[in-house]
Image: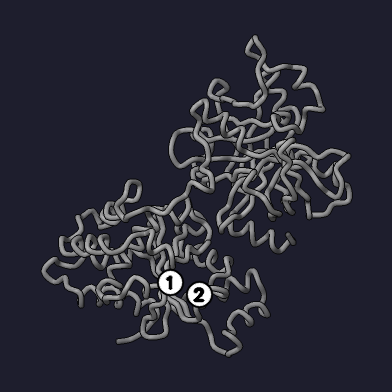
Amino acid sequence: MEKRDFDAFNERNKLSQYAVKISNVRTGSGVLFMPQEGEYAYIFTVAHVVRDFIKNRNFPVFETYFGKSEYKEDELDSCLLYKKNEQGKYDEDVLDDKESYGNSEDVGVFRILKASFPSIASHCIGIEYINEKKINEEFDFGGFGFPNNSESVVQIFGKIRKWKEEEKLFTCENEYITNDFISSMSGYSGTGIFIEKDNHLALAGLIVSCKSNELHNRFKVVGMTDILKKMSEVNWKIPKSEEEYSIPQTFISEGCNCIEIIEKRYAGDTIQKKIKDIFFNIINNFTPKELAENENFHNIPVCLKHREDCSYYWAGKLLLLIYFHCLNINKGDIHNYLWKEDIKVEYICSEGSGMADIGTVVSSIVRSKVLKNIFSSKSIIIWQSSKTPERRILAKRKMSERIDSIFEENFGEACKEGYYLMDGENKKREYGIVHINEFIDRLANMHNDEINMCKLIEVFEEVMKRCMEIDG
């Protein structure tokens, strides 16, 4: 992985939000796991970083991207892989044995009340993990830690080379070259190693050792499976496996009640009967499973969970299907539909920087390169988010100005010029973006007696005309 590839990887996934600095006589790193449900957060690290807590109850300090945690000592719990002796204590000989540092049992996790963190920490995106045995090829990895007691996060990236079953450890190679590799790795212990698999971010493991006999900038990483199994045994919340995410069978299946989500956004009113009838007609003819065969789940940061099994993603899609239903378009043709014969209708789901702000959503779209590489040269982008934005539409000219400013701030004139060339033609790309709530408000304001197919098409097309600045 080259530096520019890591920068793009980090931009997509905001890796620094997971990094934790742990100070406990010695200093090391950790990974923050903030589940959406429940009252607890979790911090993964390796046991030798918090040896003085394990032996002497010397309580560690946790500093995160969101700020320092403030907790009461009796509210901090730990879970370790090290085995306890007959007295219910961890074997001090093992804790003091430097040869045991860096083995597969040298890993642990803290459980801490979410209320111990600044409230903004609730915006930390949940993580998933990947079973180490599923990494059967070389993967690029990236992460952030706190080497040598650094005040701020420091990047680390490279390749996962191989998994050794007998050691239960990965060998990884750091491609961010330093002059003194061994000493520069001090403090990275506990740093999360993240990979992308099928466009999803997954935690592969934690840096556990870097010994002088390792060659070529290589170090060891412990996988997540054993510590997560231990957490499950004590009924602690664990991240989902990257295999656990599944597309809902229907729009109203358990955990994906799209009608309910749309109704909550209906300005406090119930959905009109005629529109509700259309929804159920759609539900009887379309399923997320079928639509997903041609669906582009665009990897646009930041999203609070997987789009494939996100009820908000499918609620927005269900609403958009009203338009295609009224046009009598077959499910197989939806993906290729062109509005006004040359404008593609694209559907995305993103929270932008985390608060569903339209400016940061556009920045995320540009940085993820879907405009340049995936979206056609003329597209109206229908945007969905779990949070409700203040500004919900950015028409074509304003969108173009916003894209220009993003390029000027980040990419330079030459890159911008190349970006606007479409297949070698000197033709500007044209985009507009509108939030799904703009359509919801228009539908909510319709009287039941005026609802028919033609009127519904008008509602959708009026918003899209505004977005693309088309008269008439």
- The residue positioned 20% from the left and 77% from the top of the image is 454
Image quarter (top left, top right, bottom left or bottom right) of the C terminus: bottom left
Residue 400, horizontal then vertical, whole percent: 51, 78
Residue 406, horizontal then vertical, whole percent: 58, 70
- Determine whether, in the image, residue 202 is placed left or right of residue 465: right
Q: Mark 1: which amino acid?
A: Glu
Contact, mark 2 vs mark 1 (Cβ under 8 Å): yes
Q: Is the residue marked by circle 2 packed among few (<14), some (14-19), or many (20+) residues within 10 Å?
A: some
- Determine whether, in the image, residue 287 is placed left or right of residue 116: left
Read off the residue under disc 1. 346
Image quarter (top left, top right, bottom left or bottom right) of the N terminus: bottom right
Q: Is residue 242 above or below residue 450?
A: above
Residue 223, horizontal then vertical, whole percent: 66, 39
Query: Toward the viewer: 210 or 421?
Result: 210
- The residue positioned 60% from the left and 35% from the top of the image is 43
Read off the residue under disc 2. 375
Q: Is residue 383 above or below residue 339?
A: above
- The residue positioned 71% from the left and 54% from the top of the image is 138
Q: Is residue 281 above or below residue 416?
A: above
- Determine whether, in the image, residue 308 is placed left or right of residue 299: left
Colour option used? one colour
- The residue positioned 53% from the left and 85% from the top of the image is 428
